[in-house]
Image: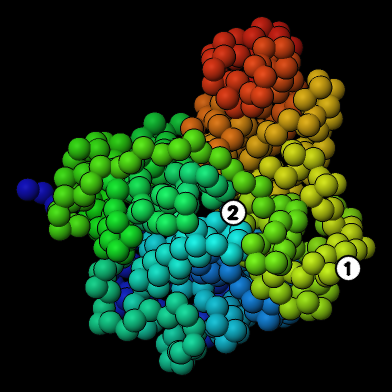
Amino acid sequence: MTEPKLSGNEKIKQDSNYLRGNIASELADANAFVSDESYELLKFHGSYQGYDRDTATERKKQGLDKTWEFMLRLKMPGGRLSAEQYLALDTQCDTHANGTLRITTRQTFQFHCIVKDHLKPFIADINRILLSTLGGCGDVVRNVITCPAPIRDNIHATLENACFTLAKHMAPKTDAYWDIWLDGEKMENYPFLPTPAAGEPLYGETYMPRKFKIALGQPEDNCMDVLCNDLALLALFDGQELQGYNIAIGGGLGMNHNNAKTFPYLAKPIAFIKPADLVRASEAVVKLQRDHGDRGDRKHARLKYVVAEKGMQWCKSTLDGYFGSTLDEAKATAKWAIVDHVGWHEQGDGKWFLGVAIPSGRIGDGLGGVNYRTALREVISTYKMPLALTLDQNIILCDIEEGEKTAIAQMLRKHGIRLREELTDLARNFIACVALPTCGKALAEAERVQHPLEASLQTLMNTHGIGQDKIAVRIAGCPNGCPRPYVGDIGIIGRTPGTYALYIGGDFEGTRLNEKIFDKVPFEHITTALEPLFITYKTNRSTGEGFGDFSHRYGIEAIKKIALDTLAATHKWAA
Protein backbone atom coordinates (compact mmCIF):
# COMPACT_ATOMS: atom_id res chain seq x y z
CA MET A 1 0.00 0.00 0.00
CA THR A 2 1.37 3.43 -0.99
CA GLU A 3 1.95 5.79 1.92
CA PRO A 4 -0.13 8.99 1.54
CA LYS A 5 1.79 12.13 0.63
CA LEU A 6 2.23 14.42 3.62
CA SER A 7 1.85 18.19 3.51
CA GLY A 8 4.86 20.37 4.15
CA ASN A 9 3.52 21.26 7.59
CA GLU A 10 3.82 17.64 8.68
CA LYS A 11 7.54 17.58 7.96
CA ILE A 12 8.04 20.90 9.75
CA LYS A 13 6.38 19.46 12.85
CA GLN A 14 8.26 16.17 12.57
CA ASP A 15 11.63 17.91 12.30
CA SER A 16 10.93 20.49 15.00
CA ASN A 17 12.15 18.54 18.04
CA TYR A 18 8.72 18.90 19.63
CA LEU A 19 8.00 22.49 18.57
CA ARG A 20 11.46 23.95 19.12
CA GLY A 21 12.71 24.36 15.58
CA ASN A 22 14.77 27.52 15.14
CA ILE A 23 12.39 29.78 17.03
CA ALA A 24 14.86 30.75 19.78
CA SER A 25 17.63 31.75 17.38
CA GLU A 26 15.26 33.63 15.07
CA LEU A 27 13.82 35.60 17.99
CA ALA A 28 17.35 36.83 18.68
CA ASP A 29 18.28 37.84 15.12
CA ALA A 30 17.95 41.29 13.58
CA ASN A 31 15.05 40.50 11.25
CA ALA A 32 11.58 41.88 11.92
CA PHE A 33 10.06 38.57 10.81
CA VAL A 34 10.61 34.82 11.17
CA SER A 35 11.07 32.07 8.57
CA ASP A 36 8.20 30.08 7.09
CA GLU A 37 9.14 27.10 9.28
CA SER A 38 9.12 29.17 12.46
CA TYR A 39 5.87 30.82 11.35
CA GLU A 40 4.20 27.39 11.40
CA LEU A 41 5.70 26.39 14.76
CA LEU A 42 4.90 29.71 16.43
CA LYS A 43 1.21 28.89 16.09
CA PHE A 44 1.57 26.14 18.70
CA HIS A 45 3.06 28.74 21.05
CA GLY A 46 0.04 30.99 20.55
CA SER A 47 1.22 33.40 17.84
CA TYR A 48 0.61 34.16 14.18
CA GLN A 49 3.00 36.27 12.14
CA GLY A 50 1.37 38.85 9.91
CA TYR A 51 1.78 42.37 8.55
CA ASP A 52 -0.18 45.60 8.32
CA ARG A 53 -2.30 45.06 5.23
CA ASP A 54 -3.42 48.69 5.14
CA THR A 55 0.10 49.93 4.37
CA ALA A 56 1.58 46.96 2.45
CA THR A 57 0.80 48.17 -1.10
CA GLU A 58 2.09 51.70 -0.55
CA ARG A 59 5.24 50.47 1.17
CA LYS A 60 5.92 48.09 -1.71
CA LYS A 61 5.66 51.00 -4.18
CA GLN A 62 8.24 52.83 -2.08
CA GLY A 63 10.58 49.81 -2.09
CA LEU A 64 9.98 49.19 1.62
CA ASP A 65 9.37 45.91 3.36
CA LYS A 66 6.02 45.12 4.95
CA THR A 67 5.35 46.30 8.50
CA TRP A 68 5.73 42.93 10.18
CA GLU A 69 3.76 42.22 13.33
CA PHE A 70 2.53 39.33 15.43
CA MET A 71 -0.78 38.35 16.98
CA LEU A 72 -0.68 36.57 20.35
CA ARG A 73 -3.56 34.47 21.72
CA LEU A 74 -3.96 33.14 25.25
CA LYS A 75 -5.09 29.67 26.26
CA MET A 76 -7.66 30.40 28.97
CA PRO A 77 -10.03 27.46 29.63
CA GLY A 78 -13.63 28.52 30.10
CA GLY A 79 -12.62 32.17 29.76
CA ARG A 80 -12.00 32.52 33.50
CA LEU A 81 -9.51 34.99 34.97
CA SER A 82 -8.96 37.05 38.09
CA ALA A 83 -9.10 40.82 38.47
CA GLU A 84 -5.33 40.87 38.99
CA GLN A 85 -4.74 38.94 35.78
CA TYR A 86 -7.03 41.23 33.79
CA LEU A 87 -5.38 44.39 35.10
CA ALA A 88 -1.94 43.00 34.29
CA LEU A 89 -3.05 42.24 30.71
CA ASP A 90 -4.51 45.73 30.49
CA THR A 91 -1.06 47.14 31.29
CA GLN A 92 0.75 44.71 29.02
CA CYS A 93 -1.32 45.62 25.98
CA ASP A 94 0.25 49.09 26.17
CA THR A 95 3.75 47.79 26.83
CA HIS A 96 3.80 45.12 24.13
CA ALA A 97 0.81 45.50 21.75
CA ASN A 98 -1.49 48.15 20.27
CA GLY A 99 -3.25 49.29 23.44
CA THR A 100 -6.30 47.04 23.10
CA LEU A 101 -7.41 43.65 24.37
CA ARG A 102 -9.63 41.61 22.07
CA ILE A 103 -12.02 38.93 23.26
CA THR A 104 -12.20 36.05 20.79
CA THR A 105 -15.12 33.79 19.92
CA ARG A 106 -13.37 31.03 21.91
CA GLN A 107 -13.40 32.70 25.33
CA THR A 108 -9.91 34.07 25.42
CA PHE A 109 -7.90 37.22 24.70
CA GLN A 110 -5.69 37.98 21.76
CA PHE A 111 -3.40 40.92 21.18
CA HIS A 112 -2.38 42.60 17.94
CA CYS A 113 0.48 44.59 16.37
CA ILE A 114 3.26 43.06 18.47
CA VAL A 115 6.77 43.57 17.07
CA LYS A 116 9.09 40.58 17.17
CA ASP A 117 11.34 41.97 19.92
CA HIS A 118 8.35 42.12 22.26
CA LEU A 119 7.10 38.60 21.67
CA LYS A 120 9.32 36.84 24.21
CA PRO A 121 8.93 39.39 27.04
CA PHE A 122 5.17 39.51 26.43
CA ILE A 123 4.78 35.72 26.69
CA ALA A 124 7.00 35.69 29.78
CA ASP A 125 4.85 38.41 31.39
CA ILE A 126 1.69 36.42 30.61
CA ASN A 127 3.10 33.29 32.22
CA ARG A 128 4.15 35.18 35.35
CA ILE A 129 0.50 36.05 36.02
CA LEU A 130 -0.26 32.31 35.70
CA LEU A 131 -1.78 32.44 32.24
CA SER A 132 -0.40 30.86 29.08
CA THR A 133 -0.37 30.98 25.29
CA LEU A 134 0.68 27.33 24.74
CA GLY A 135 -1.81 25.78 22.31
CA GLY A 136 -3.65 29.04 21.71
CA CYS A 137 -3.19 28.21 18.02
CA GLY A 138 -1.66 25.26 16.16
CA ASP A 139 -2.51 21.62 15.48
CA VAL A 140 -3.51 20.68 19.01
CA VAL A 141 -6.61 20.85 21.20
CA ARG A 142 -7.35 24.58 21.33
CA ASN A 143 -8.94 26.52 24.18
CA VAL A 144 -11.58 24.30 25.81
CA ILE A 145 -14.81 26.28 26.16
CA THR A 146 -17.95 26.10 28.29
CA CYS A 147 -20.77 28.27 29.63
CA PRO A 148 -19.29 31.44 31.17
CA ALA A 149 -22.16 32.19 33.55
CA PRO A 150 -20.94 32.14 37.20
CA ILE A 151 -24.14 30.56 38.47
CA ARG A 152 -23.37 28.85 41.78
CA ASP A 153 -25.05 25.50 41.28
CA ASN A 154 -23.88 21.97 40.57
CA ILE A 155 -24.67 22.24 36.85
CA HIS A 156 -22.29 25.11 36.19
CA ALA A 157 -19.66 23.86 38.64
CA THR A 158 -19.66 20.49 36.85
CA LEU A 159 -19.19 22.08 33.44
CA GLU A 160 -16.40 24.32 34.70
CA ASN A 161 -14.53 21.49 36.43
CA ALA A 162 -14.86 19.26 33.36
CA CYS A 163 -13.55 22.09 31.18
CA PHE A 164 -10.51 22.54 33.42
CA THR A 165 -9.86 18.79 33.58
CA LEU A 166 -9.88 18.39 29.80
CA ALA A 167 -7.78 21.51 29.26
CA LYS A 168 -5.01 20.18 31.48
CA HIS A 169 -5.16 16.66 30.08
CA MET A 170 -5.06 17.77 26.42
CA ALA A 171 -2.27 20.34 26.81
CA PRO A 172 0.94 19.65 24.86
CA LYS A 173 3.60 18.08 27.10
CA THR A 174 6.70 19.48 25.38
CA ASP A 175 9.16 21.55 27.42
CA ALA A 176 9.92 23.65 24.35
CA TYR A 177 7.46 26.34 25.42
CA TRP A 178 9.21 27.08 28.71
CA ASP A 179 12.69 26.64 27.22
CA ILE A 180 12.03 29.23 24.53
CA TRP A 181 9.94 31.83 26.33
CA LEU A 182 11.03 31.54 29.99
CA ASP A 183 14.56 30.15 29.64
CA GLY A 184 13.47 26.89 31.23
CA GLU A 185 11.46 28.35 34.13
CA LYS A 186 8.01 26.86 34.78
CA MET A 187 5.16 28.56 36.59
CA GLU A 188 4.46 25.79 39.09
CA ASN A 189 1.24 27.38 40.36
CA TYR A 190 -0.31 27.57 36.90
CA PRO A 191 -3.43 25.38 37.26
CA PHE A 192 -3.23 23.93 33.75
CA LEU A 193 0.47 23.12 33.72
CA PRO A 194 0.61 19.78 31.87
CA THR A 195 2.04 16.76 33.64
CA PRO A 196 5.65 16.36 32.35
CA ALA A 197 6.10 13.48 29.93
CA ALA A 198 8.76 12.36 27.48
CA GLY A 199 7.77 13.42 23.99
CA GLU A 200 4.06 13.74 23.35
CA PRO A 201 2.24 10.57 24.46
CA LEU A 202 -1.08 11.76 23.02
CA TYR A 203 -0.03 13.86 20.04
CA GLY A 204 3.24 12.30 18.86
CA GLU A 205 5.92 14.25 17.03
CA THR A 206 3.57 15.41 14.26
CA TYR A 207 0.76 16.48 16.63
CA MET A 208 -2.75 16.68 15.10
CA PRO A 209 -3.51 16.94 11.35
CA ARG A 210 -5.23 20.27 12.10
CA LYS A 211 -6.66 22.21 15.02
CA PHE A 212 -9.06 20.39 17.31
CA LYS A 213 -11.81 22.16 19.26
CA ILE A 214 -13.70 20.94 22.34
CA ALA A 215 -16.80 22.48 23.92
CA LEU A 216 -18.92 21.49 26.91
CA GLY A 217 -22.50 22.62 27.16
CA GLN A 218 -26.07 21.59 27.91
CA PRO A 219 -29.17 21.78 25.70
CA GLU A 220 -30.83 24.29 28.01
CA ASP A 221 -28.07 26.85 27.33
CA ASN A 222 -26.14 26.44 24.10
CA CYS A 223 -24.45 29.83 24.43
CA MET A 224 -21.19 28.33 23.11
CA ASP A 225 -22.62 26.83 19.88
CA VAL A 226 -21.38 23.46 21.06
CA LEU A 227 -22.09 21.64 17.77
CA CYS A 228 -19.58 23.82 15.90
CA ASN A 229 -16.74 21.91 17.60
CA ASP A 230 -14.79 18.78 16.67
CA LEU A 231 -15.87 17.31 20.00
CA ALA A 232 -19.15 18.51 21.48
CA LEU A 233 -19.85 17.27 25.00
CA LEU A 234 -23.45 17.78 25.98
CA ALA A 235 -24.01 17.38 29.72
CA LEU A 236 -27.33 15.78 30.65
CA PHE A 237 -28.67 16.46 34.14
CA ASP A 238 -31.55 15.14 36.19
CA GLY A 239 -32.18 18.22 38.28
CA GLN A 240 -28.73 19.08 39.61
CA GLU A 241 -27.32 15.56 39.23
CA LEU A 242 -25.14 14.81 36.20
CA GLN A 243 -26.26 11.68 34.36
CA GLY A 244 -23.48 11.76 31.79
CA TYR A 245 -22.57 13.31 28.45
CA ASN A 246 -23.83 12.92 24.93
CA ILE A 247 -20.83 12.95 22.60
CA ALA A 248 -21.18 14.56 19.17
CA ILE A 249 -18.24 14.66 16.76
CA GLY A 250 -17.14 16.41 13.59
CA GLY A 251 -18.24 20.02 13.99
CA GLY A 252 -16.27 22.69 12.17
CA LEU A 253 -17.13 25.77 10.14
CA GLY A 254 -14.09 26.57 8.01
CA MET A 255 -14.39 26.23 4.24
CA ASN A 256 -13.04 27.74 1.04
CA HIS A 257 -15.10 29.54 -1.58
CA ASN A 258 -15.52 27.49 -4.77
CA ASN A 259 -14.06 24.33 -3.24
CA ALA A 260 -16.76 21.69 -2.83
CA LYS A 261 -14.38 19.46 -0.88
CA THR A 262 -14.62 21.95 1.98
CA PHE A 263 -17.80 22.79 3.87
CA PRO A 264 -19.19 23.78 7.27
CA TYR A 265 -20.52 20.89 9.34
CA LEU A 266 -22.26 20.46 12.68
CA ALA A 267 -21.18 17.71 15.09
CA LYS A 268 -23.26 14.53 14.93
CA PRO A 269 -24.31 12.59 18.08
CA ILE A 270 -22.40 9.33 18.35
CA ALA A 271 -22.45 8.07 21.96
CA PHE A 272 -23.40 8.59 25.59
CA ILE A 273 -20.85 8.27 28.39
CA LYS A 274 -20.98 8.19 32.17
CA PRO A 275 -19.28 11.08 34.00
CA ALA A 276 -16.28 8.92 35.00
CA ASP A 277 -15.48 8.26 31.32
CA LEU A 278 -15.16 11.89 30.26
CA VAL A 279 -11.39 12.00 29.80
CA ARG A 280 -11.04 8.52 28.30
CA ALA A 281 -13.83 9.08 25.77
CA SER A 282 -12.59 12.56 24.85
CA GLU A 283 -9.10 11.21 24.28
CA ALA A 284 -10.55 8.48 22.07
CA VAL A 285 -12.12 11.13 19.80
CA VAL A 286 -8.82 13.02 19.65
CA LYS A 287 -7.08 9.79 18.61
CA LEU A 288 -9.71 9.18 15.93
CA GLN A 289 -8.81 12.50 14.31
CA ARG A 290 -5.08 12.13 15.01
CA ASP A 291 -4.86 8.83 13.14
CA HIS A 292 -7.43 9.30 10.38
CA GLY A 293 -7.38 13.00 9.55
CA ASP A 294 -5.99 13.97 6.14
CA ARG A 295 -2.32 14.88 6.63
CA GLY A 296 -1.79 15.52 2.93
CA ASP A 297 -4.27 18.39 2.50
CA ARG A 298 -4.71 20.86 5.34
CA LYS A 299 -7.91 22.21 3.77
CA HIS A 300 -9.36 18.71 4.16
CA ALA A 301 -7.82 17.75 7.50
CA ARG A 302 -10.50 18.42 10.11
CA LEU A 303 -12.46 15.64 11.82
CA LYS A 304 -15.64 16.71 10.00
CA TYR A 305 -14.31 15.25 6.75
CA VAL A 306 -13.60 11.91 8.40
CA VAL A 307 -17.16 11.86 9.75
CA ALA A 308 -18.80 13.03 6.52
CA GLU A 309 -16.87 10.68 4.25
CA LYS A 310 -16.41 7.52 6.33
CA GLY A 311 -19.85 7.66 7.93
CA MET A 312 -21.11 7.37 11.46
CA GLN A 313 -21.10 3.57 11.56
CA TRP A 314 -17.40 3.43 10.75
CA CYS A 315 -16.66 6.27 13.18
CA LYS A 316 -18.61 4.54 15.97
CA SER A 317 -16.84 1.17 15.62
CA THR A 318 -13.44 2.87 15.33
CA LEU A 319 -14.18 5.07 18.33
CA ASP A 320 -15.21 2.00 20.34
CA GLY A 321 -11.79 0.53 19.59
CA TYR A 322 -9.97 3.59 20.91
CA PHE A 323 -12.24 3.71 23.96
CA GLY A 324 -11.69 0.02 24.73
CA SER A 325 -15.34 -1.10 24.83
CA THR A 326 -18.64 -0.45 23.10
CA LEU A 327 -19.97 3.02 23.83
CA ASP A 328 -23.69 3.46 24.55
CA GLU A 329 -25.90 5.18 22.00
CA ALA A 330 -26.51 8.91 22.46
CA LYS A 331 -29.64 9.79 24.45
CA ALA A 332 -32.53 11.93 23.27
CA THR A 333 -32.20 15.57 24.37
CA ALA A 334 -34.67 18.28 25.27
CA LYS A 335 -35.32 21.32 23.11
CA TRP A 336 -32.25 23.51 22.78
CA ALA A 337 -32.15 27.11 23.97
CA ILE A 338 -29.79 30.06 24.33
CA VAL A 339 -29.60 31.97 27.61
CA ASP A 340 -28.65 35.64 27.39
CA HIS A 341 -25.80 36.40 29.80
CA VAL A 342 -25.74 40.14 29.05
CA GLY A 343 -27.12 42.34 31.83
CA TRP A 344 -27.72 41.71 35.53
CA HIS A 345 -28.29 38.16 36.78
CA GLU A 346 -28.43 36.53 40.20
CA GLN A 347 -25.68 33.97 40.80
CA GLY A 348 -27.62 31.88 43.30
CA ASP A 349 -25.37 32.69 46.25
CA GLY A 350 -26.76 36.12 47.10
CA LYS A 351 -24.41 37.89 44.66
CA TRP A 352 -24.88 39.11 41.10
CA PHE A 353 -23.05 39.03 37.81
CA LEU A 354 -23.15 41.62 35.04
CA GLY A 355 -22.65 40.73 31.39
CA VAL A 356 -21.18 43.72 29.54
CA ALA A 357 -21.52 43.78 25.74
CA ILE A 358 -18.25 44.54 23.92
CA PRO A 359 -18.79 45.05 20.16
CA SER A 360 -16.39 42.81 18.23
CA GLY A 361 -14.78 41.99 21.58
CA ARG A 362 -12.41 44.95 21.18
CA ILE A 363 -11.59 46.52 24.55
CA GLY A 364 -10.07 49.90 23.78
CA ASP A 365 -10.84 53.58 24.18
CA GLY A 366 -12.52 55.88 21.69
CA LEU A 367 -14.26 53.01 19.91
CA GLY A 368 -17.57 54.32 18.61
CA GLY A 369 -17.23 57.12 21.15
CA VAL A 370 -16.97 54.65 24.06
CA ASN A 371 -14.02 54.17 26.43
CA TYR A 372 -14.40 50.46 27.10
CA ARG A 373 -10.89 49.97 28.40
CA THR A 374 -10.93 52.86 30.86
CA ALA A 375 -14.38 51.88 32.13
CA LEU A 376 -13.48 48.25 32.75
CA ARG A 377 -10.16 49.17 34.35
CA GLU A 378 -11.90 51.54 36.75
CA VAL A 379 -14.56 49.00 37.76
CA ILE A 380 -12.23 46.01 38.04
CA SER A 381 -9.51 47.85 39.95
CA THR A 382 -12.13 49.20 42.38
CA TYR A 383 -14.08 46.00 43.07
CA LYS A 384 -11.46 43.30 42.27
CA MET A 385 -14.11 40.89 40.98
CA PRO A 386 -13.32 37.70 39.07
CA LEU A 387 -14.20 37.71 35.37
CA ALA A 388 -15.38 35.44 32.60
CA LEU A 389 -15.32 35.89 28.83
CA THR A 390 -18.24 34.80 26.68
CA LEU A 391 -18.38 33.09 23.28
CA ASP A 392 -20.08 36.20 21.88
CA GLN A 393 -17.01 38.35 22.71
CA ASN A 394 -18.51 39.93 25.82
CA ILE A 395 -17.19 40.09 29.40
CA ILE A 396 -18.89 39.07 32.63
CA LEU A 397 -18.15 40.80 35.95
CA CYS A 398 -18.76 38.22 38.69
CA ASP A 399 -19.40 38.10 42.47
CA ILE A 400 -21.00 41.56 42.75
CA GLU A 401 -22.70 42.50 46.00
CA GLU A 402 -26.26 43.84 45.82
CA GLY A 403 -25.13 47.19 47.22
CA GLU A 404 -22.43 47.61 44.55
CA LYS A 405 -24.70 47.34 41.52
CA THR A 406 -25.70 51.00 41.19
CA ALA A 407 -22.16 52.35 41.48
CA ILE A 408 -20.80 49.83 38.97
CA ALA A 409 -23.53 50.69 36.45
CA GLN A 410 -22.79 54.40 36.89
CA MET A 411 -19.06 53.85 36.33
CA LEU A 412 -19.68 51.99 33.08
CA ARG A 413 -22.26 54.44 31.76
CA LYS A 414 -19.98 57.38 32.61
CA HIS A 415 -17.59 56.14 29.92
CA GLY A 416 -20.32 55.51 27.37
CA ILE A 417 -20.95 51.79 27.84
CA ARG A 418 -24.55 50.76 27.21
CA LEU A 419 -26.01 48.15 29.53
CA ARG A 420 -28.54 45.46 28.66
CA GLU A 421 -31.63 47.66 28.83
CA GLU A 422 -30.08 50.20 26.41
CA LEU A 423 -29.12 47.65 23.74
CA THR A 424 -31.23 46.38 20.88
CA ASP A 425 -31.52 42.64 20.39
CA LEU A 426 -29.61 43.06 17.12
CA ALA A 427 -26.67 44.68 18.93
CA ARG A 428 -26.52 41.90 21.51
CA ASN A 429 -26.57 39.18 18.88
CA PHE A 430 -24.11 40.64 16.38
CA ILE A 431 -20.64 39.05 16.09
CA ALA A 432 -17.72 40.18 13.90
CA CYS A 433 -14.26 38.73 13.39
CA VAL A 434 -11.03 40.77 13.30
CA ALA A 435 -10.53 40.69 9.50
CA LEU A 436 -8.53 43.59 8.01
CA PRO A 437 -5.93 44.93 8.57
CA THR A 438 -4.35 42.35 10.91
CA CYS A 439 -5.72 38.99 9.69
CA GLY A 440 -3.80 37.53 6.77
CA LYS A 441 -6.78 35.44 5.64
CA ALA A 442 -9.31 38.27 5.41
CA LEU A 443 -10.86 38.90 2.00
CA ALA A 444 -13.07 41.79 3.19
CA GLU A 445 -13.76 43.95 6.23
CA ALA A 446 -15.66 42.73 9.31
CA GLU A 447 -14.82 44.38 12.65
CA ARG A 448 -14.25 47.80 11.11
CA VAL A 449 -17.67 47.80 9.43
CA GLN A 450 -19.67 46.34 12.31
CA HIS A 451 -21.01 49.66 13.63
CA PRO A 452 -22.26 51.10 10.30
CA LEU A 453 -23.70 47.74 9.23
CA GLU A 454 -25.48 47.23 12.53
CA ALA A 455 -26.92 50.75 12.34
CA SER A 456 -28.19 50.32 8.77
CA LEU A 457 -29.68 46.90 9.56
CA GLN A 458 -31.44 48.29 12.63
CA THR A 459 -32.91 51.12 10.55
CA LEU A 460 -34.11 48.63 7.93
CA MET A 461 -35.65 46.35 10.57
CA ASN A 462 -37.37 49.30 12.24
CA THR A 463 -38.79 50.40 8.89
CA HIS A 464 -40.43 47.01 8.41
CA GLY A 465 -41.71 46.59 11.94
CA ILE A 466 -39.25 43.92 13.07
CA GLY A 467 -36.81 46.17 14.93
CA GLN A 468 -37.35 44.35 18.22
CA ASP A 469 -36.97 40.85 16.77
CA LYS A 470 -34.12 38.69 18.02
CA ILE A 471 -31.99 38.06 14.92
CA ALA A 472 -28.42 36.74 15.15
CA VAL A 473 -26.06 38.32 12.60
CA ARG A 474 -22.46 37.18 12.17
CA ILE A 475 -20.02 38.85 9.76
CA ALA A 476 -16.71 37.25 8.79
CA GLY A 477 -13.95 38.64 6.62
CA CYS A 478 -13.30 35.23 5.06
CA PRO A 479 -14.95 31.79 4.85
CA ASN A 480 -12.96 30.28 7.75
CA GLY A 481 -15.91 31.01 10.03
CA CYS A 482 -14.33 32.36 13.23
CA PRO A 483 -17.48 34.30 14.26
CA ARG A 484 -19.63 31.24 13.46
CA PRO A 485 -21.44 32.80 10.46
CA TYR A 486 -22.83 29.48 9.20
CA VAL A 487 -25.12 29.02 12.21
CA GLY A 488 -27.75 31.45 13.37
CA ASP A 489 -30.09 33.60 11.33
CA ILE A 490 -27.86 35.61 8.98
CA GLY A 491 -24.27 34.96 7.95
CA ILE A 492 -22.30 37.62 6.04
CA ILE A 493 -19.03 36.24 4.69
CA GLY A 494 -16.24 38.10 2.92
CA ARG A 495 -16.04 37.08 -0.73
CA THR A 496 -13.73 39.65 -2.36
CA PRO A 497 -12.64 43.13 -1.21
CA GLY A 498 -15.89 44.97 -0.57
CA THR A 499 -18.26 42.08 -1.39
CA TYR A 500 -19.94 39.39 0.71
CA ALA A 501 -21.86 36.14 0.40
CA LEU A 502 -25.13 36.15 2.36
CA TYR A 503 -26.47 33.08 4.18
CA ILE A 504 -29.85 32.66 5.91
CA GLY A 505 -31.90 29.92 7.55
CA GLY A 506 -29.95 28.69 10.55
CA ASP A 507 -31.69 28.56 13.90
CA PHE A 508 -31.02 30.93 16.76
CA GLU A 509 -30.13 27.98 19.03
CA GLY A 510 -27.15 26.92 16.89
CA THR A 511 -28.41 23.47 15.84
CA ARG A 512 -28.91 24.06 12.09
CA LEU A 513 -26.62 25.40 9.37
CA ASN A 514 -27.82 28.23 7.16
CA GLU A 515 -27.65 28.31 3.35
CA LYS A 516 -26.20 30.73 0.82
CA ILE A 517 -28.75 32.97 -0.86
CA PHE A 518 -26.56 35.64 -2.55
CA ASP A 519 -22.95 35.77 -3.69
CA LYS A 520 -20.67 38.81 -4.03
CA VAL A 521 -23.06 41.41 -2.68
CA PRO A 522 -21.34 44.81 -2.39
CA PHE A 523 -21.15 45.99 1.21
CA GLU A 524 -23.32 49.02 0.51
CA HIS A 525 -26.08 46.72 -0.80
CA ILE A 526 -26.27 44.21 2.06
CA THR A 527 -29.40 45.93 3.34
CA THR A 528 -30.71 46.10 -0.23
CA ALA A 529 -30.36 42.33 -0.49
CA LEU A 530 -31.96 41.69 2.89
CA GLU A 531 -34.93 44.03 2.51
CA PRO A 532 -37.14 41.72 0.39
CA LEU A 533 -36.27 38.88 2.76
CA PHE A 534 -37.38 40.91 5.77
CA ILE A 535 -40.60 41.92 4.00
CA THR A 536 -41.38 38.28 3.21
CA TYR A 537 -40.62 37.35 6.83
CA LYS A 538 -42.83 40.08 8.26
CA THR A 539 -45.74 39.11 6.01
CA ASN A 540 -45.59 35.33 6.29
CA ARG A 541 -44.10 34.39 9.66
CA SER A 542 -45.96 32.48 12.32
CA THR A 543 -46.43 33.90 15.82
CA GLY A 544 -43.16 33.81 17.72
CA GLU A 545 -41.21 32.44 14.74
CA GLY A 546 -37.63 33.70 14.38
CA PHE A 547 -36.13 34.83 11.08
CA GLY A 548 -33.94 31.76 10.65
CA ASP A 549 -36.73 29.34 11.50
CA PHE A 550 -39.09 31.14 9.14
CA SER A 551 -36.54 31.04 6.31
CA HIS A 552 -36.02 27.31 6.82
CA ARG A 553 -39.78 26.57 6.95
CA TYR A 554 -40.76 28.82 4.05
CA GLY A 555 -37.87 27.54 1.93
CA ILE A 556 -34.58 29.19 1.03
CA GLU A 557 -35.20 28.77 -2.70
CA ALA A 558 -38.70 30.25 -2.44
CA ILE A 559 -37.35 33.27 -0.56
CA LYS A 560 -34.48 33.59 -3.02
CA LYS A 561 -36.92 33.67 -5.96
CA ILE A 562 -38.90 36.46 -4.32
CA ALA A 563 -35.69 38.43 -3.75
CA LEU A 564 -34.46 37.85 -7.31
CA ASP A 565 -37.76 38.93 -8.79
CA THR A 566 -37.42 42.14 -6.78
CA LEU A 567 -33.73 42.86 -7.33
CA ALA A 568 -32.44 41.17 -10.50
CA ALA A 569 -33.52 43.92 -12.88
CA THR A 570 -31.66 46.63 -10.97
CA HIS A 571 -28.66 44.91 -9.36
CA LYS A 572 -26.10 42.94 -11.32
CA TRP A 573 -25.05 40.85 -8.31
CA ALA A 574 -28.63 39.55 -7.98
CA ALA A 575 -28.99 38.54 -11.62
Residue linked to disc 2: 391
Name the spot of residue 95 as percent of width and height, x first.
Answer: 72, 80
Local crowd at mark 2 within 10 Å, few (<14), some, or many (≥20)?
many
Work out whether residue 125 or residue 539 is closer to the camera in this orientation and state it. Answer: 539
How is colour applied across the structure in the image?
Answer: rainbow
Instruction: Estimate the x, y position of residue 145 in percent, counting from the top left.
Output: 50, 59
Q: Residue at x 64, y 27 (%)?
A: 546
Amino acid at dot 2: Leu
Other residues around mark 1 within 10 Å, as few (<14) / some (14–19) / many (≥20): few
Which residue is painted at 28% across and 46% down in the image? Answer: 271
Quarter assignment of residue 450: top right
Looking at the rendered structure, the kind of residue marked 1 is Ala
Q: CA distance from mark 2 to mark 1?
A: 27 Å
Which of pointers 2 and 1 indicates the residue nearer the eye?
1
* Front residue of this view, candidates 194 and 354: 354
* Residue 574, percent from left and from top: 65, 17
Q: Which residue: 71% across, 20% down?
A: 534
Q: Is residue 303 left or right of residue 502?
A: left
Residue 526 in the image: state x and y as whole percent: 72, 28
Residue pointed to by mark 1: 407
